[in-house]
Amino acid sequence: MNQLKRLQSGIEGLDELLKGGFVAGSSYIIQGRPGSGKTILANQIGFNHARHGGRVLFATLLAEPHERLFQFLSTLSFFDKDKVGDQLQFVSAFDTMENDGLDEVVKLLRREIVRQKSTVLILDGLLNARSKADTALNTKRFISELQGHAAFAGCTVFFLTSSQLDDGSPEHTMVDGVLELGEEVVGNRSIRRIKMRKTRGSAAIAGAHECEITENGLVVYPRLESTFTHSAMHDSDHVSLIPSGLATLDPLIGGGLVASSVTLLIGPSGSGKTTLGMSFLSQSTVHEPGLHFGFYESPQRLRMKAAALGLDFATLEQSGALTIMWKSVTTELIDKLALDLLRTVEEKSIKRVFLDSLGGMARAAADKSRLLDLYTALMGELRARNVTVVASWEVQSLLGGEMDAPAPDLSGIVDNLLLLRFVQEPTELKRRLSILKIRDNPYDPSPLELCLGEQGLDVKKVYIHALGDTSNA
């Protein structure tokens, strides 16, 4: 099968969304309301193209002077003033359009494409051209003539417009692809999104994807469940065991945790989820490093808590055996969080991950209906990378045997399910641990007590005769 030549955008995540980049020599519309990021996106494409030896003609049909554009772009890392006037030429066609009409604009741009030997043309202000054209036929003719001249010169074209054009508009019918930028208020947060409305001659990942504008420009985060779709095909075909971090727990779960498995700890606040996760990470080594990926405990507090349990996290970090990442649940995007996790796993060859917690990560999701699909893709990819995962999820019930499910069907994507709860006995409050599910390994279903003392965490069986006053707790 023939592969069309690609023009890479150089924008993190966008080329993945486009299955390798834009089709070279094609024409695209980039549309979105004012402030949605069209100009940043187009200039990132242009400066990246110039950085790789291409030549770019940036033409505008707007009245705004280029000096203001340069002043704004200079705050972004991709801007290179040495390229301006050399590999990137900026031309205003506003006066030509107003005084002489669109035919003269076409002639002007054709001359500049030839003179500059441009391989990318960016035209900002398609909405003004549409207004000047008066009729749909004239709009089509304007676009068609520009496309024809650009194609003859081997030039890829990007039209920018602030109009929310529909699929049947004259502009959409003429171009090969339509990229739409938008913004949505979710609660108190404003979420930027990008999606391909149309692609011709190329596949693309459909639907809306989250993005953000940073000091590096626009960054795109393709939906995780759309990009990691075949992770399970790389699963291990043999079973090996690793220590859980609790010597008294391992015999009860068949000798340890199955490598590359996912264990979910469910329980209320204070029941011991983080302590169990930290014990798991204490087994990290330089050859099999661990990662604490959390949302509520700062690295400083984690080190203090670990030290109180007799765990030397500081030394593990210094040796490279442990990495601690602390993320905000109020400012992050959920796909960005997942990609940061996977990137760190790859860069540091991580083999153990404690994700504290899935509930905290869920707070970053603008669309809660995606959670199960995203978690399925994330856990599948971690398994495929031979990473053993322990994750936590906080539930609201503090006492008793009844627990609200953390999320519909979530237990189906994990291998092991451990339930932590409090039990009120006549004279004290005790922690209980119930092993609800262990996949691929035999386990002891006996009721267990979780004991936290000066020597750290310990697990003990609760015998029947000792349950007298607690069986109905």
Image (cartoon, helix red, strand yellow):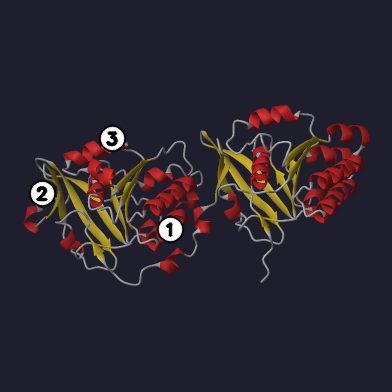
Q: Which residue is mark 2?
A: 469
Looking at the figure, which quarter contains the N terminus? Answer: bottom right
Which residue is labeled 3 in the image? 300
Q: Position of residue 47 (x, y in %)?
A: 66, 42
**318 and 193: which one is in front?**
318
Neighbor class of circle 1 (other Cα within 10 Å; few <14, some 14-19, many 20+) is some
Residue beneath the point at 29% across and 50% down: 266
Residue 255 appears in the picture as rendered: yes
Picture coordinates of residue 350 (x, y %)?
34, 54
User: For this view, does 272 lie left or right of residue 388?
Assistant: left
| Residue found 27% across the figure and 67% down from its top | 240
Residue 460 pos. (x, y %): 12, 54
Of residues 469 and 81, the one drawn nearer to the viewer in this rendering: 81
Residue named by callout 1: 376
Q: Earlier in the sequence, mark 2 or mark 1?
A: 1
On screen, residue 29 versus residue 251, left or right, reads right
66 left or right of 362 in image:
right
- Give yes or no for contact between labels 3 and 2 (Cβ–Cβ under 8 Å): no
Crowding at mark 3 (Cα within 10 Å: few <14, some 14-19, many 20+): few
Quick one: SS at disc 2? loop
Mark pair 3, 2: CA separation: 40 Å
- Decide if residue 207 is in sight here: no
Closer to the chain start, of discs 3 and 1, is 3
Instruction: Kindly identify the amino acid type of the residue bearing the numbered disc 1.
Output: Thr
Instruction: Name which quarter of the figure residue 274 lies in.
Output: top left
